[in-house]
Every structure is written in structure tokens, then in C-alpha cells.
Amino acid sequence: MALKPDASSVHKDVSPPVAASTPAAPSSDVTTAPLKASIISVKVPALPLSPPLDDDDNDNDNGNDEEGGNNSDSDGGGAGGVIASHAHETLLLEAMEAQGSRGVVLPCDSPSGRGDDSRVASSSATTPSSSNGDLLPTTVTPTHYDIHLRPDLATGIVSGSVSVDARINEATDKIVLHAKSITITRVVVYHGGSQLGCVGGDSVVYDNSELEMATIQMPCALQPTKAGDCVQIIITFSGVLSESMYGLYRCKYRDRKGSPSVMLVTQFQAKCARLAFPCWDEPAIKAEFTLALTVPASHTALSNMPVVQETEGPGGAGSKTVFFARSPRMSTYLLAIVSGELDYVEATALSGEPVPNSDPPRRAAVPCRVYTAAADIDKVRFSLETAVRVLELLVDMFGCAYPLPKLDLVAVPELEAGGMENWGLVLFRTVRLFITAQTSLWIRQKAVYVIAHELSHQWFGNLVTMAWWDDLWLNEGFATWIGIHVTDLMYPEWRRWDHFAIEDRQAALSADSLRSSHPVQVTIKGSADIDQVFDSITYYKGCSLIRMLSAHLGTGAFMAGVRAYLNAHAYASATTGDLWAALEAASGQPVAALMHSWTAHVGYPVVSVDADFERGSLRLTQNRFLHSGHVTPDEDRVLWWVPLGMVSSECAAPVHAVLHGRAGDFAIPGSASGAAWIKLNHNNAGLYRVRYSRDALRRLAAAAAAPTELLPTADVVGILNDAVALAISGHVPTSAVLDMVAAFRARRRRRPEFVVWQILGLFLESLHQTWADRSPPALRERIRALARA
């Protein structure tokens, strides 16, 4: 249930929710204490944390029962929401080192040591390609980081330490991890209370190439640890606040007094956690995180988890050290930090675990906040209401409780992307959260979409993460589809899929019609290639493929497969093949075989339609479509699985036939009654273009302009977009499109749809610019007359 904006409350000059200071019995509920001295106390719920390790380290047989958030394999003593028993561990170990103590090590099967790395799991299904030389060796893998960062906003210098619980998988005298713009000054390794080795910064070799690795040479070999056991690697280091919007950086904003100031922000995706602290910075190497952050005393410090304690900082009353609760297992790129003089509005979403014995059934409340500078607090109320509604919708769709005890959204003035899905601390550009009565409808629509997109990642991307960046499309394509789908459910009058068809889908079709395009599932040959795949192919072609598949399987079967996928791979990594397997089990269809040509190959087809309306038959042929119009035989070898989605004048319900080969013969739906027209690719659900014969195109134009709505807007948009693209590529004559435009005059008078006329306007403008100086006067006048009409 969404909370109305006027029911939310504004809180100023306070820190984030402080969790109970002592361990409590696991609870699935979240309670909020009354306001006292502007501080809210939140009892952190028991999280459905990562499954316990099996003795054979097999990550694919973990017995997850995550539907509804229950985990039958929980050991009962390791609830991640209970305050970690060593929240001060890093600071304590630093003090012990200074005193020459040998330290105390927590075993991996304790609540603070649970975790696994799918890179060393027995199944290859979630293992990145072993031929990728950019991957870290798997000799040492982390299960838990305890990090303390002390950034100096004035000088830009960061001092820090990290204590890593790690498994030794093979005997080695080297620890290889990622570090960039960081100087490691000291490394100590403990096991079972004994110090195994201690080295200084001169024993660290940095690879300053694109690999961005650091190799720590230990004085003796570290022997493999037993199942459930760990060594503890304590690293002290120094670094700098980034000068770009990556890593840990300074962001300009106005503080509570309205004066120019700087706040701390992180952007770790895709490979920038290594700029902030030494780590194993690959998505498949998941671990749990405990964080301590020393910041100015006036700051509100935020991270993925709630605050458990604040103490006076080492600089006295002018600073403070903020300790955060232990996170569930996640990838390094999802760790996040924000610190500044921020205020917030708050509401609750019924998106937690089911409340036992509740009648009617309900879910526990999860506190949701939107943080921003004090002067802008009234601009984020709409975003708060939207976040609550979206979170509750997603819980119902995924059949799985929101996994964390809180959700914070932060408006950041300087952010590399429009939004970043850090688990529990989602960052947005201010334009995506600042919505007022004067905000345009288009900006409002984009805000709802981006919030839905980023919140969907809390499950699809954060709870289950791609094993390597070659499956980035799985994260971003799905989140794009969910973002539009949820926006359409919340505001059907906005017709977001129509806008997707004219903008984002066309962006994907345009980019993928070039020889320089790439498959959605692209091989990442090196770390430098990662940033190159955050493009329209990954996002919009990926979304179009998800939409095409969900339309073919049916939304019910598709979402059932998604829920099974999330359950099977919760707190672990997965690949495209894992999703296909779950969808196959849910739908009974060979999804992997159907989708292989779409994900593994570049491009898409144009389906040529040869319709015989007298006989009621169709001859369909597929070929690769290129913007240039010239396709060589070598470029036309791929045969796509093409769901046709056919409707006709006599059959409004789509017939879900499929073209598998180069060509095929089909009956026109409703041909027994004498169909007057045929339309393929109903609602633009398929990612392909359709080339109709001139007669079939005239019939469609007449149907689109008919007094009654025979064709919905989405289909009209598809017909026009395809006709214009095919005219540009030379597949159809331009005059055929002009005939269509003339037929659309009647439709404009009855249904002035913006998206339809935007397409026509852009086409006529392009045509006029092309022929303005070289065409006969009669042609120029005809174009102008069509534009005026």
C-alpha cells in the first residue's frame, strides 16, 4: 500500500536509522520508535542471508528456499540482520597490531564468515570464461570485508584499512587483488590466532596496465584452508578522492546553510571499487561487508545497511566514526557510501517478510527514505511515494521480500549515470528525483521509469548478479523491461510502451542495423571493454528481447520462470543460460534454442510479406536487415526464431505462429471470412522489421485511417517506423510511404496521437531536407502539402 505524500514526514539534521546496539532475536518485522531528539531507532530484521557453505563448496546446490524470503537452510545463529558481532573489528585489529597482538580469527562458518565465490564453485554455469586473462586467480577468495575509511575532504587524501576473511583454495605465497590509485603500506595475515606473515609496502607489486592488480608477496606459502575456515588478511593503505565521478569522490552541493560545499559519493560500477580500497573487484566474487566511515560531525553518513553505532572521531568533536551493520553477500560494485549535510522524507513500504499469523496477510514494513540537500526537500515527495509503490509492486511480482532492512534513495548533483542501483542505497541524478507541480509530464514519466528500473535491480542484479560483464544485458535489459512494465501498470494512461516503440526500440534497431554493432551477449576480451557495452544494444535491444520472449511465453509463465531463477541463484551469480533454464521449466518451451540466435549474433531480420488475400495465404521470408540496404551472403547466414504475432481484419486476437527457417507458408488469420488486411508483429513485441508488399501496405494504411480503431497506436507506430526505415534503406520506394502519409490525414482528425505524428513529422522533415535543392518543384510542393496536412 502506497503512502500519500502528505503522510510522509520530514526529518532534519539527523543521522540515518540506528539499529539496536545489542544483538536481538531474529525478527521479520521492522518497528519504528517515536521521534525522540530527532533520532529514529530501527530494529534490523533477520535477513534471508546467503546460504551456508556446503563442505564441497558447491554453490549450485545450496538448498535455497527464498520464496517469500524463508531459508530453511539457515543455521539459526547467523541472521544477517542481527548486528554483526565484530562491527568494530577493523579498528580493534589495528589497535592489536599496534600492540603486537596476534589477533583473533573468526571461522568462515560463523555468522561473520559466511559466503562463497562462484568463481571456485564446481559448476561452470556461473563461472566466467577461464580464457579471460583479466580475471583474478582463484587461489585466495574473500568471504567478508571489514572496511574503515577516513577521507579528508579538504586535502582529498584517504587513509584506510580493510580486514578480509578469506579462503585459501590453493597453496600460494602471493595474494593478488585489485587496487588502483592506492598505496598498500602493510599486510598482516592471521590464522587461528597465529600470525602467518607480515610485509610492508615494498612487498607489493602493482600492475599499472588495464588489469589494475596488486600482487602481495608473502614471506611463506599460505596453505589451503579447510571447509568453513578462513585466514584473516589485514591491509592498511592510503588513497585519494577521485577527480572523476568514479570510485569515492567529492561532489559539489549546497550544505544546510546554503553555502557551496562538497559531499562524499561513490560510483563503483563497473570496476571502480578498487579505487577506494583493495578488493577482489569482480561481480562473481561476492562477499559480506562491514563498514566504518569517519566523516565530519555535521554529516549524515549513509551506506547499504543501517547505522549500528556512532562514536566521536579521532579528530575530536569535529568528526565522527559511523559503523554500519553487516551486509548480505554482494558484489563489490554494489557497495556504496554517501556523506553530507542531508535531510530526508520518509515513508514505509509493506515489502518485507510476511508477518506471521497476520489476518489479512500482510508483509512487514520497510522504511524508505529519500535524501537530498535541505533546500530541496519538498521536491522529492513524489519520488518517495513512487519508490514505495514500486517496491510493493516488485515484491508481488517477484514473490520475494525486499532483502534488506531499509531502502534509501539519494539525489546527487553530480552522478555519472541517471541512476545507480547500489543495494539499499540507490543514487539518482537530481533531475530524476526532483518533481514539483511545475515539472513537465515527460520528466515525471522518466522519473517513475528510472526509479522502477533501479529498484528492480535490488533483486535482478543485486540479489542475483551476472557472473561476468558479458551478461550485462541480462541485468540492464531486464531492468529496462521491468521499469517500463511497472510504469505502465502504475500509469496506463501514459502508454509507456508506445513511447518505447518510437524511441528506445528504434534506437536499438538503428544501432543494430549497422555492421559495427555487437551481440547483446558480447565477449569481454579485457577490462577496458567493460564500459563499452553500456549502450543502446545492451539496454534497449536487451529489453526488446525480454519483451518479445515474455509476449511469446505469456507474462504469467515468464514471471514464474523469473521467480524460480531468483530463488535458485539468490546471493550468488548466474548467466543467461541459467535464466533460460528457469524459463524452460516454467513454460515447457525450448527457450535457450529459441533465443540463441538473438543473443549470440549481431543484427536482426526483416520479414518480407507476400500476401495472397484471395487465397488467404502468406509467404514469409527473413533476411538480415542493414541500414545500408546491401547485405552480402556471408552477412545473411543467421536464421532467427521469429514470433509472428499475426492479426487481421477478421482476427483481432494475435495468432502466435513462428517463422523458424528462411521462408515459410502461413494462412492469413480469419482468411475464411475474407480478410481485408494482415498485420505482423502485434504491438511491436518482436524485434524485427516487416516489409509488406505495396498492396498489403495500402490495405494497412486504409485500416489505420478507418473511422473505427481497427489498429491500436502501437501497431500503427510499428507500421510507420518500419516503412520509413525500409524506404531509407531502399527496400521499398519512398512513394509507398508518401501514399501512407496521405492516407493518415483522416486518422489525424479523429485521433491526434503524438507518437504517430512525431514519426511522420520527422520523416517529412528528413525528406524535405534531402530533396529541398534537387527535386522538381512538384515533388517539393507535394512534400510541403503533406506536412501541412
Image (cartoon, helix red, strand yellow):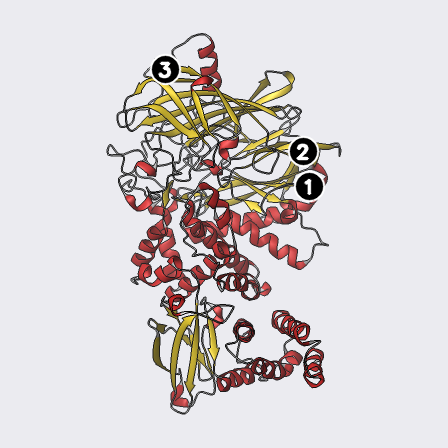
Give the percent coordinates (x, y) of residue 579: 35, 53
Extreme-top residue of the structure: 99
**Residue corresponding to mark 1:** 377
Q: What is the three-letter code of the residue carrying label 1?
A: Ile
**Residue corresponding to mark 3:** 197
Foreground pick, 505 / 314: 505
Residues at discs 1 and 2 in contact (Cβ within 8 Å): yes
Foreground pick, 781 / 229: 781
Q: Nearer the viewer, mark 1 or mark 3?
A: 3
Judge the density around disc 1: few (<14), some (14-19), many (≥20) Cα neighbours within 10 Å: some
Q: Is residue 521 above or below residue 358?
A: below
Give the percent coordinates (x, y) of residue 391: 51, 48
Under tag 3, what secondary structure? Answer: strand
Residues at discs 1 and 3 in contact (Cβ within 8 Å): no
Q: Which of marks 3 and 1 precedes in the sequence?
A: 3
Under tag 1, what secondary structure? Answer: helix
Q: Is residue 577 left or right of residue 477?
A: left
**Residue corresponding to mark 2:** 12
> Quadrant of residue 654 in the image?
bottom left
Judge the density around disc 3: few (<14), some (14-19), many (≥20) Cα neighbours within 10 Å: some
Q: CA distance from mark 1 to mark 3?
A: 52 Å
Q: What is the three-letter code of the residue carrying label 2?
A: Lys
